[in-house]
Each structure stands twice: as C-alpha cells, then as structure tokens.
C-alpha cells in the first residue's frame, strides 16, 4: 500500500518498537505499513469518527491484518493499551495534537511521533509539559506543502521561547526546507513593510525580521 512522503517519514521512526498506536488513523495506512514491514509487532488504529473508523476497519480486513491491527473508535490516547510504546499523531493542527498529548495518561509510551500541520510551537510546549524531550526534527516538503515532524522520547526538557517557536534541532541543524520557509516569511514581510503606516506595527515587523535573520544565520 503506497503512502505519502509525509507518512513515510513518520513510519520510519516506528522501527524497532513493539506496539504502535496511530491516533487519527483515517485509512489506517500507517499501522498497516508498520506491521507489514515488521517495524512493530502489532498496532492500534484509532480514530474518533465513524467514517474513518469504518474505512480503517475495511482496509485492515483487506490486508488480512485483523490479528495484528486493532481498529478502535476512540478519542486521542484514552484507549491505548498498556503495552503501546510508540504513538503517531499526524496530519492534524498543532492545537489538537497538543490537547491530545496533555489530556490522557501516557501509560508506557516511550516515543511520540508528531506531525502538526501548523502551530508546531504548541506541540513542542506540550512535549516539555508531559515529561518528554525532542530527539529529532525534520522539515519536509510533500506535494508543495512544508511540514514539521517532531520526534519525542521520555526525558526532561527546558526549551527557550525561540526553541519552542522554531524547534531546538531545527535551529542547530538548519534543514533546507526550514531555511526556505523562513526566507519566504522574510520576503513577505519585506514586501509589506514599506506600506505599513502604524509605528507599532512597523516595529513589530522589524523585530520579527531581525529574529528570522538571526535564526537562519
Ligand atoms: C486529516 S486526518 C489525518 C490522517 C492521517 N493521520 C495522516 O496523517 O494522513 C485527521 C484524522 O484525525 C481524526 N481525529 C481528529 N481528532 C481526533 C481525536 N481527538 N482522536 C482521534 N482521532 C481524531 C479525524 O477523524 C481524521 O480521520
């Protein structure tokens, strides 16, 4: 079963774990691939809506994986089994991912693989709040869109405002699409700046520009 570059990047980080829970599984593509490739021995495919739940269920049956992939109608991580050690939450807003992370017991999860579509700073703050720390970050481009991928394992962290905003590993490693995204924002701000008449807004944009230049230096 073919999956997107974005899901494939999430999938790679499940390798070597025992049991995966994919939250917001939609078509169950991720758990089907993780089990088929032998990256994990079993999985829970969880979605909180009836439509995706039914599609996930029929896909799991189609690939004859019902003994290895359990499809569950459930909200966030509330129904994960105690032997789940790796959780993927991908393709949602950062606000929703952060709510899911903060809400229920993390049980025995050792790794979260998180791919927010926006507001990544909220996800990083939630990671710190639940006693996890960022061990890898990717900024990837798929279908002309740029996505953050954040990998967090158990461990204490204490991030600065700038690290929360841009990502502690992104700041150090400056991946290609991270730089591209910031350059795009810089170009946009430079274009609007001459048209700004309010002094306070002008200063706001100038200080954002200074920060962005600093981050990619
Ligand atoms: C846009 S899809 C993303 C599907 C897939 N994870 C991906 O990355 O391509 C988001 C899915 O999350 C589900 N969802 C939203 N909130 C959820 C929650 N609190 N718990 C479980 N699933 C949720 C939606 O029903 C939907 O199927």
Image (cartoon, rainbow, N blue to C red):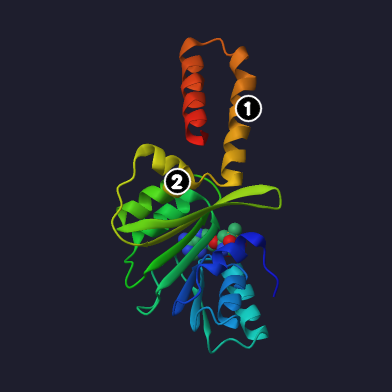
The image quadrant where one finds ligand 1 is: bottom right
In front: 195, or 60? 195
Q: State the SS at label 2.
A: loop
First in sequence, mark 2 or 1: give its number. Answer: 2
x, y percentage for residue 164? 40, 43
Give whichever of 213, 115 is nearer the camera.
Answer: 213
Please name which of the two marks, 2 or 1, marks the residue nearer to the observer: 2
Q: Is mark 1 within 8 Å of ligand 1?
A: no
Spatial CA span between label 2 and label 1: 21 Å
* Callout 2 touching callout 1 (CB < 8 Å): no
Residue 5 screen position, x and y as percent: 65, 61
Q: Nearer the viewer, residue 119 or 163?
A: 163
- Nearer the observer, 9 or 174: 174
Measuring from the top left, give residue 110's x and y in whole percent: 37, 69
Residue annotated with mark 2: 167
Q: Residue at x 53, y 46 (%)?
A: 118
Instruction: Tell me the quarter of the picture where residue 102 sits.
Output: bottom left
In this view of the protein, can residue 76 be seen by the observer?
A: no
The N terminus sits in image quarter? bottom right
Q: How many marks?
A: 2
Q: Position of residue 190 (x, y in %)?
A: 61, 21
Q: Is residue 4 above or below residue 54?
A: above
The image quarter containing residue 83 is: bottom left
For residue 93, say whether it is visible: yes
Q: Which residue is mark 1?
A: 188
**In this rendering, position of residue 159 left or right of residue 95:** left
x 67%, y 68%: residue: 3
């Amino acid at each position: 079963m073919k999956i997107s570059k974005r899901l494939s990047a999430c999938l790679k980080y499940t390798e070597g774990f025992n049991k995966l829970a994919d939250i917001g599984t939609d078509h169950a593509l991720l758990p089907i691939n993780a089990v088929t490739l032998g990256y994990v021995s079993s999985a829970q495919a969880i979605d909180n809506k009836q439509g995706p739940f039914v599609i996930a269920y029929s896909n799991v049956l189609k690939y004859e994986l019902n003994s290895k992939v359990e499809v569950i109608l459930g909200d966030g991580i509330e129904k994960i089994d105690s032997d789940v050690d790796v959780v993927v939450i991908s393709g949602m807003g950062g606000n929703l991912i952060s709510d899911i992370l903060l809400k229920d017991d993390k049980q025995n999860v050792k790794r979260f693989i998180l791919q927010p579509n926006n507001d990544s700073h909220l996800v990083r703050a939630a990671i710190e709040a639940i006693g996890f720390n960022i061990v890898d970050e990717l900024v990837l481009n798929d279908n002309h869109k740029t996505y953050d991928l954040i990998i967090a394992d158990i461990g204490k962290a204490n991030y600065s405002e700038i690290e929360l905003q841009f990502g502690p590993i992104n700041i150090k490693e400056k991946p290609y699409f991270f730089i591209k995204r910031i350059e795009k924002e810089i170009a946009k701000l430079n274009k609007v700046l001459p048209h700004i008449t309010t002094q306070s807004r002008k200063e706001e944009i100038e200080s954002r520009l200074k920060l962005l230049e600093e981050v990619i230096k």
